[in-house]
Amino acid sequence: MKSVLLSIIIPCYNEEKTLEACAKGIQTISSQDLQLEIIIVDDASTDNSFAIASSLSQTFNNIRVIRHEINSGKGAALRTGFTHATGDFVAVHDADLEYDPRDLVRLIEPLRNNQAEVVIGSRFLSGDAHRVLYFWHSLGNRLLTFLSNMLTDLNLSDMETCYKVFKREVIQSITLSENRFGFEPEIVAKVAHKRLRVYEIGVSYHGRTYAQGKKIGLKDGFRAVYCILKYNLPTAPFVLQLAAFVTVSCLAALVNCALFLGLSGLGAQLSWAAPIAFAGSAVLLYGIASAVIFRRNAQWNTPITSALALIILALCCLASHHLTLLLQNHGFDAVPARLLAGGLALVCSFWPLKYLVFHEKPAPPWTS
């Protein structure tokens, strides 16, 4: 078999307890037909990680060390590593000991055989050893994978896995933005939109506890949801965009109702309370829609577009106000009338916003 060079990127932040064992473990998979290039990116560690990495680079001539002066996150470290990779294939390997580097030999086989451009290692497919740990983490991973699959149209079993291997020209052609653990949903989204050939192979997993240095937390889970939406919805099919818009509209309608009740409680007249409440909910809806659903089309620097958006929202506000009065005249109480009128007006704003305000064809996700 033809010899290939595998570049392994190790993002490292305060991993002095495991870094040396990790790097030496990776060295064991080197063979006559598999050469290794190990790039350790120290993300401004405050412990002895950088010193250990430097010592390893002096011991092994295939280890290179790059240091960030400011801690920027796993995604930023991986971007640096990808830029410096020179191998035929590029793999991600965390600095802890949760993954077995011997699995990388199997992961690169579809790449070597030109069956795939990307191979992902799944912790949920393998029959190999797995440490039993956090139920809620496992459930969270599956839910995030489900949401990601729904928008990317992939059938992955483990989107959040560390083990992802790429052909070098593929990963270096993708522009990445996320600095922390949002890298995982971002790279999956951009790979999916490029319609690359993706394979998935089961891997073993030896998870560690927070006491042992695990860093990912609840806020990273919320960020992952945001990233899944951010990098998929702008190019999603019309039905999915509309569903997302309706969901946000329901949230905005609740805000509309709450503002209306608050202003009414302060003695404001209906003619003032209703439009002010709607304006607040419309701003919320417009902000979320332009940041996530239509993000790649947002034209913040076009006065005409901004004016058009204001006109559309003003017309929706006027329609909501008159519909509220109409419903109340037909026996509806104030609260359900506001919820129904505001929700309908906000949902109906989808079409003019999509086709008039954000009218340009979305740019491919991997170029933005």
Image (cartoon, helix red, strand yellow):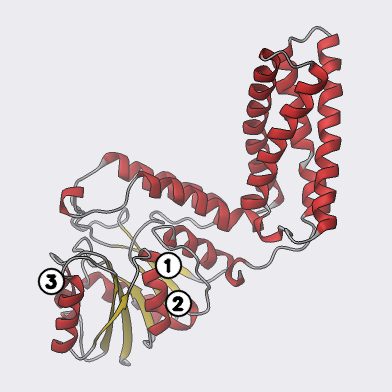
Nearest to N terminus: mark 1 or mark 3:
3
Instruction: Please say if the residues under marks 2 and 1 sit with CB atoms less than 8 Å apart.
Output: yes
Cα separation between marks 2 and 1: 8 Å
| Quadrant where the N terminus is found in the figure | bottom left
User: Neighbour class for label 1 at 10 Å: few (<14), some, many (≥20)?
Assistant: some
Q: Say left or right for 333 vs 16.
A: right
Cα separation between marks 1 and 3: 29 Å
Label disc, if present, on residue 21 of the rendered structure: 3
Is residue 94 in view? yes
Nearest to N terminus: mark 3 or mark 2:
3
**Residue 234: x %, y % from top left:** 65, 56
Label disc, if present, on residue 115 of the rendered structure: 2
| Quadrant where the C terminus is found in the figure | bottom right
Q: Is residue 344 above or below residue 67?
A: above
Residue ID for mark 1: 199
In the image, which is nearer the foreground, mark 3 or mark 2?
A: 3
Cα separation between marks 3 and 2: 32 Å
Nearest to N terminus: mark 2 or mark 1:
2
Q: Is residue 21 above or below residue 285?
A: below
Q: Amino acid at mark 3?
A: Ala
Quadrant of residue 70 within the rendered picture: bottom left
Q: Amino acid at mark 1?
A: Tyr
**Residue 54: x %, y % from top left:** 19, 82
Q: Say left or right for 136 vs 269.
A: left
